[in-house]
Amino acid sequence: MLDALLDALTFFPRGLVYIALGVIVLLVAKLARDLTTSHREDEEVVDKKNLAEALRLAGYLFGVVLVFVGSVYQPTHLALADEGFGFDAEFGLDVLRVFLYAVGGIVALNIVRIVMDRLVLYKFDVSREILQDQNAGTGAAEFGINVATGLMIAGAISGSGGAGELAEALTSLAFFALGLVVLVAFALFYEITTSFDIHDEIEKDNVAVGVAFGGNLIAIGLVMLKALSGDFLGWASGITEFVVFALVGFVLLYVLRLLVDLLLLPKVRVSQEISEGRNIGVAFLESAVVISSSLILFFAI
């Protein structure tokens, strides 16, 4: 027991370094956000009490943290030096590597959010809905997009490619691009398999639809995190595994939405409650079921 305590105390100082680095990364992310938007985040969230913008910003920061965790989650970061706390040159390089990957993730998130707004929520002007109309449904959907994107970046950069830093970065970029294709495809699949037009409902300030849609995007993001994470063992095996997980995710999340209707809420139609009743509670319940099931899939397989 004493040995375990000493081991924990030995790891603790290194952990504090990563916590401090995480705070720095969040500050850099907030600065990057301020520099790449035409509005002032603080004014929207604090002065105007814009819930929609707060949801979008929260999803962005959550996504940044997920990217940071993905960059930290490397076998080399868990090894200690034979003596002391492991504050050596190798540890310094690890910290620098984590920071650079996190900054790269911040850049990717800020670029991708522009692209995703045009590919996922393509039927209306997202910025107008959030900034002018303060549409919380749009904010909830944006929260899901940002978190799902962060999950996929985290999966793409975790593990090791084993062929040098440049090759590893290019491999991560390629699989992340595949993940974005799946995210857009799933958004289209979700709209096709629902009995209502999600864009029309969200544009009409239906928060419940935005919450349910955002929750499903996070769920497929978790499935993609599983598909993308781990060591790269070759293109054939990597792409095959990726496609299998994507197909499983599509089928699983669709079936789960049906099961929510049949088993958890047998007396009501979930789609009707979300679209016509605008029942945010039902939307959160659906989101909880699909996200929880994706977590089970992540840890069970």
Image: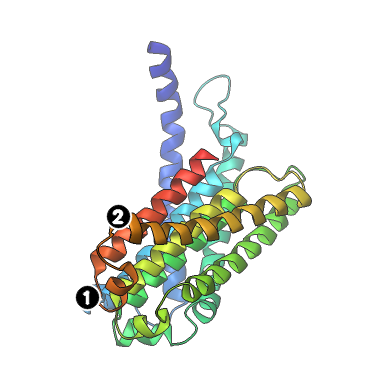
In front of the other: 38 or 189: 189
Asked if one can make out residue 29 in the rendered structure from this viewpoint, the answer is no
The numbered mark at residue 91 is none
Pinpoint residue 178: horizontal percent, then vertical percent.
Answer: 65, 63
The numbered mark at residue 49 is 1
Location of residue 65 by image quarter? bottom left
Badge 1 local density, few (<14 within 10 Å), some, or many (20+)?
A: few
The colour scheme used to paint the residues is rainbow
Which structural element holds mark 1? loop
Name the side, left or right, on which 296 lies relative to 263.
right
Q: Which amino acid does label 1 sit on?
A: Lys
Location of residue 159 by image quarter? top right
- Quadrant of image for the N terminus: top left
Badge 2 local density, few (<14 within 10 Å), some, or many (20+)?
A: some
The image shows residue 215, relative to residue 129, as above or below, that is above
Q: Name the residue under label 2.
A: 264
- Quadrant of image for the C terminus: top right
